[in-house]
Image (cartoon, rainbow, N blue to C red):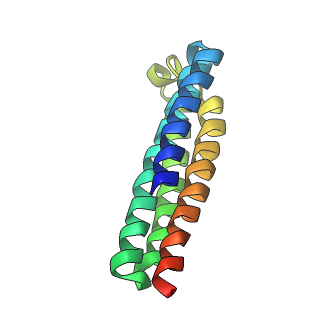
Amino acid sequence: MKLFSTSLVTGILGACVAAWALGGTLGAGALVGALLGLGISAVAVAKQRHALLHDPKQALNIFVLASLVKLVAVGVGGALLRYVDVLAARADWVSFLIAFPIAVLWLTSLGSIANMKILEHRTT
């Protein structure tokens, strides 16, 4: 769990630094994308951890459902930032679409490594 928590905090700090460096609507889009990706991934990894501890048969189902939620979130978020003028004036849709998968990949991969340690301890 220490790896997961550290990865989440590092991801949030990295998103904030990148948004500050980009500035303006580019930074806002990157921050929104990264925070949304990190948020969804954090919930997904936590649900997978819970499933691995209590009902390991559900872990794959949770992974697939989380992947679908992430796909819908990036599609809806990108479309909203692209086609809703009020949102487009505040956050760039391209930087959102770049930051979201980077954040998802970061936290999902490191969270999965942390969850694999649970399986190692359960099998021994």
Q: Relative to 108, is 118 on the left or the right?
A: left
Q: Work out whether residue 76 can be spotted.
A: no
**For the N terminus, which image quadrant?**
bottom left
Q: Is residue 12 above or below residue 22?
A: below
Q: Position of residue 49 (x, y in %)?
A: 41, 67
Name the residue rendered at 41%, 80% in the picture.
58
Name the residue rendered at 62%, 46% in the picture.
101
Q: Is residue 29 above or below residue 119?
A: above
Residue occupying the far top of the picture: 24
Q: Is residue 89 above or below residue 73?
A: above
Name the residue rendered at 52%, 17% in the picture.
89
Q: Position of residue 106 (x, y in %)?
A: 61, 48
Q: Relative to 66, is 18 on the left or the right?
A: right
Q: Position of residue 123 (x, y in %)?
A: 50, 86
Q: Is residue 10 above or below residue 25?
A: below
| Among the 4 quarters of the image, the one containing residue 102 | top right
Q: Relative to 13, is 49 on the left or the right?
A: left
Residue occupying the far left of the picture: 54
| Among the 4 quarters of the image, the one containing residue 51 | bottom left
